[in-house]
Every structure is written in structure tokens, then in C-alpha cells.
Image: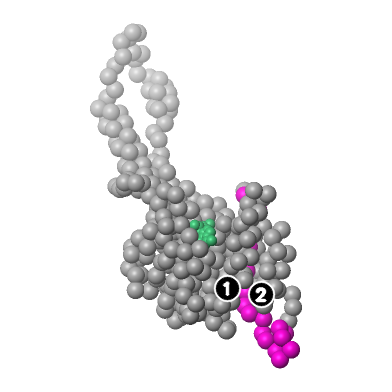
Amino acid sequence: MPLRLPAFPSSGKVANSAVSSGLPPRPAGRRRPPPPSVLRSCVAGLLAIISAWYVPGGAAAEQVIEHPGSLELVYIGYQQDNPPQLLVKAHTKYFLVDKGVTIPSINSIYFLEYIRINEGESVLDIGTGVGIQAIFAADKASRVVATDISPKAVDNARRNVRRYQLEDKVEVRQGDLFGAVRPDEKFDVVLMNIDYPYNDQTQHLWKVHERFFREVTHYLKPRGRIYYQIGLLDNLPVIRRFARENGLLIMELHMARAMKKNRELMVYRLERLPETRNGPALKQ
Ligand SMILES: C[S@@+](CC[C@H](N)C(=O)[O-])C[C@H]1O[C@@H](n2cnc3c(N)ncnc32)[C@H](O)[C@@H]1O
């Protein structure tokens, strides 16, 4: 619920109306004490301001994050826990974010908008962060495995999973990409939204994405699908190559331009190429 500042009383208008009311002028040099009604309204105004900015257990600098998608993303404010955690509202759910863990971003919320999970499916969420995609997936999935390379993120995601009482359905594990997934585990859906290459300094991240594409089909059921988020239209040719080289087909692509960030948000849905007796049936 957005916090709003109360309307401030306009002191200028009060002074002017007193002058035009025909009251005798005040004696020079002596200030009359304000009438009790003015004092009362000042105190009431002050209390209203304080109560609007004070949320028990939390701070109030709420920020509604602008983005081109249609789901809501709000950074509600820091909770007064020790250490303080940021409370974030993503679509219909709330997530606590620990210091040192990536805050759900416009990429996260755009990704969430295009993920479709069917009743009873199994889901693997790679690079889960605070657990947002995994926790939403659990609305429909029968089982979710969420992994992250960062121990802090794993700890944070586990706590969010507990807050939603989803421990029986969502398992959070620490590991590099598929490092924490057993070779015999197969999923209907694999989700992946991790840091991606966007400038010269981040080019090394291609290696992680290339590895993801090389390994993902091993963990995917034969008719499974992948939802993958990587910003920037310029990255499209590389993704198409990774898909082609690993027998995957881009079935769906959603893109929107985030004007403030000056970059595109892009969500891909990929599936295995149908096999024929002569090998893959289609090429992109
Ligand atoms: C940008 S955050 C996204 C979090 C979440 N998927 C979302 O949609 O909001 C990326 C996360 O991926 C994790 N990550 C980065 N490299 C990874 C890797 N090689 N294996 C697993 N997780 C990784 C980071 O620790 C971070 O928590």
C-alpha cells in the first residue's frame, strides 16, 4: 500500500485572511501566542506526518519501479531488523532482500510476466536470487528446485520460501548452474535469469551462458521448455547460435524497451528441436 504524505496546511493563507478580516493590528515588537486551535492543528499536522512516515518494523521510502511490463514492482523500504532487509513487492507477493543479494529488478518482473507453469509441473530455477521466480512457480508446480551460486542468496531465498510455508515444495540449493542438480533429475521447465553480458567488462559472462546452453538439455524432460531472460537486442544473434548449437529452438520471444535504462528486456521460450530420422527437423 503506497504511503502518502498528508496535505500540509497553507500558513500563508491564514495570515492573509487575518489581515483582511478587519482585526486591529498587533502591537509592534510583541508576538501574540498562537490561539489554541492553531496549536492543535499544528500538532495534528505533525502527528499525521510522523504516522505517514513511520511503519512499525519498517522504513517508509517507498519506490514504485517504472518498467515497460504490466506487473507491479515496488521497493517498499528497509525493515528495521538487524541487519536491515529491503522489503520488495513483486506482482502479488512480498520478498525480503538481504544486504549483498541482488534486488529483484525490472528484468526479474518482466521475466515473471512471461513464465507459464502448468498444474503439477516440475521446475528448476537457476540463479534464484531471493527466490522470486521459484516462489511464483510454486503456485502451480508440484515441485521446484532453486539454485544459486551465492550462499547469501541461498540463505535469503530459503527464508522467503519459509515465509510462504513452501518448504515442502521448493528446495533451495547452492551451486554453480547445474552443479547442485543430480544427473538423474529432469524437469518440465527450466528458468534462468542471471547476470548477463552488457558491456566490454562483462563479456566473460558469455562463458556462463554458453555453459548453460550446453548443459540444460540434460536436465530437461523430452518435451520440456526453458524460459530464459537476457537483456539487449544485440545479444540475440549469440543466443540464436547457442540455441542452434545445442538442438534448441526459440519458440517465443518477448521484448520491451526500458527507456530509462536504455536497454531492451528480453524473455525467450526455448524447446528442443523435434528429432527426425535424419537429425534435427528445423534450423533457425
Ligand atoms: C540478476 S539475479 C536474478 C535473480 C532471479 N533469478 C530473478 O529473476 O530475480 C542473478 C542471480 O544469479 C546468481 N548467479 C550468478 N551466476 C550464477 C551461476 N553461475 N550459477 C548459479 N547462480 C548464479 C546470482 O548470485 C544472483 O543471485
Q: Name the residue under label 1.
A: 216
Magenta region includes residue 55: no
Q: Nearer the viewer, residue 157 or 3?
A: 157
Q: Is residue 127 among the parts visible in the rendering?
A: no
Most common secondary structure along the magenta stretch: strand
Question: CB under 8 Å between callouts 1 and 2?
Answer: yes
Q: In which quarter of the image is residue 267?
A: bottom right
Give the x, y percent position of residue 4.
41, 45
Q: Is residue 255 among the parts visible in the rendering?
A: yes
The tag on residue 246 is 2
Q: In which quarter of the image is the C terminus?
A: bottom right
Give the answer, above or below, for where 176 lies relative to 18.
below
Q: What residue type is labelled 1?
A: Val
Give the x, y percent position of residue 224.
56, 80
Q: What span is colored magenta in the figure?
A: 261-281
Other residues around mark 2 within 10 Å, as few (<14) / some (14–19) / many (≥20): some
Residue at the image position 42 percent from the left and 48 percent from the top: 99
